[in-house]
Image: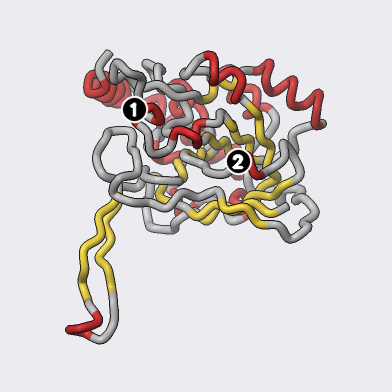
Amino acid sequence: MCNACLIDSVRESALSRRDFFRRSAAAGLAATAAGTLAARPALAQSSGKVVDLTYTLTPEFPTFDGKPGISLDPDKDYAADGYKIWKVSFFEHSGTHVDAPMHFAEGGLSVDNLTAESLICPLCIIDLKAKAAEDPNAMVEPEDIENWISDNGDIPEGACVAMNSGWGAKMGDASFRNDPEGNFAFPGFAKSATDMLLGMGVASIGVDTLSLDPGNSADFAVHYSWLPAGRYGIENLANLDGLPASGATIFVGAPKHANGTGGPARIMAVL
């Protein structure tokens, strides 16, 4: 299926699922009120090392729909005004960014209503590089989560579970977004895995790719289930190789504009 056809198909599906979103968003808000995301997470002990997980957002940065995600136009300049100001315009889902529940759930939490507590999380990183080397549309599956737990212990409630597929090595190349035939091709989460993480009280999931769902997804099953459940996602994480599988704390500098469906964010991890 061509990229434009896929986007149109998903748009039609979104309209047909409007009632589902209303019900799911209500359920997600109820879960939040119950304390799943508002509870203070168990933070890692810090040694003082900070790793920046954020890409610099430029007009050339790859986006899902292929349009430039940001534009910068001069508003004030040193010669004429004595100081410098840019007028910055960007699409919410550009660069390293947050997907708020409202992105796929009418009536869901907007980015400005994400609790501060849910934006500071123990970070659990699942290494998917071997699978992604074999399959560009590889997925984090329940078995990968079980293996992580076997090696590292339980995933803390309120954690951010991130996928490290090694996709950052492709940044700047067309293969970050597409296969040679022009189809979307990049790793993501399987719905069966995110359903499992919902049951564990995980606050967020993160990927080092363009989407929470794999590139060949025809239905955005993770977006349609994870976000309406009141959780949030992070896309285009950088520098995950600089962190261990467990032991770091992630700080999600989500934007706070009213009624936002998400937005570019400065993401830091502290060891």
Disc 1 residue crowd, few under 14, some 14–19, many 20+, Cα 10 Å = some
Q: Under tag 1, what secondary structure?
A: helix
2 and 1 marks in contact (CB < 8 Å): no
Disc 2 residue crowd, few under 14, some 14–19, many 20+, Cα 10 Å = many
Q: Is 220 left, or right, of 244 in this rendering?
A: left
Rendered residue at 27%/68% (across/down): 86
Please tell me in which quadrant of the rendered image residue 12 appears: top left
Residue 33: x and y in percent read 60, 44
Rendered residue at 56%/28% (across/down): 165
Q: Is 209 left, or right, of 218 in this rendering?
A: right
Please tell me in which quadrant of the rendered image residue 171 appears: top left
Q: Is 214 left, or right, of 153 in this rendering?
A: left
Q: Is residue 178 above or below residue 256?
A: above
Residue 16: x and y in percent read 30, 21
Q: Earlier in the sequence, mark 2 or mark 1?
A: 1
Q: Is residue 80 visible?
A: yes
Report the residue marked by disc 2: 240
Residue 27: x and y in percent read 53, 33
The amino acid sitting under disc 1 is Arg
Residue 61: x and y in percent read 34, 44
- Report, in whole angstroms, how far the alpha carbon at label 2 lies from the one at label 1: 35 Å
Q: Under tag 2, what secondary structure?
A: helix
The amino acid sitting under disc 2 is Leu
Rendered residue at 33%/51% (across/down): 58
Q: Nearer the viewer, residue 205 or 158?
A: 205
Q: How many marks?
A: 2
Report the residue marked by disc 1: 18
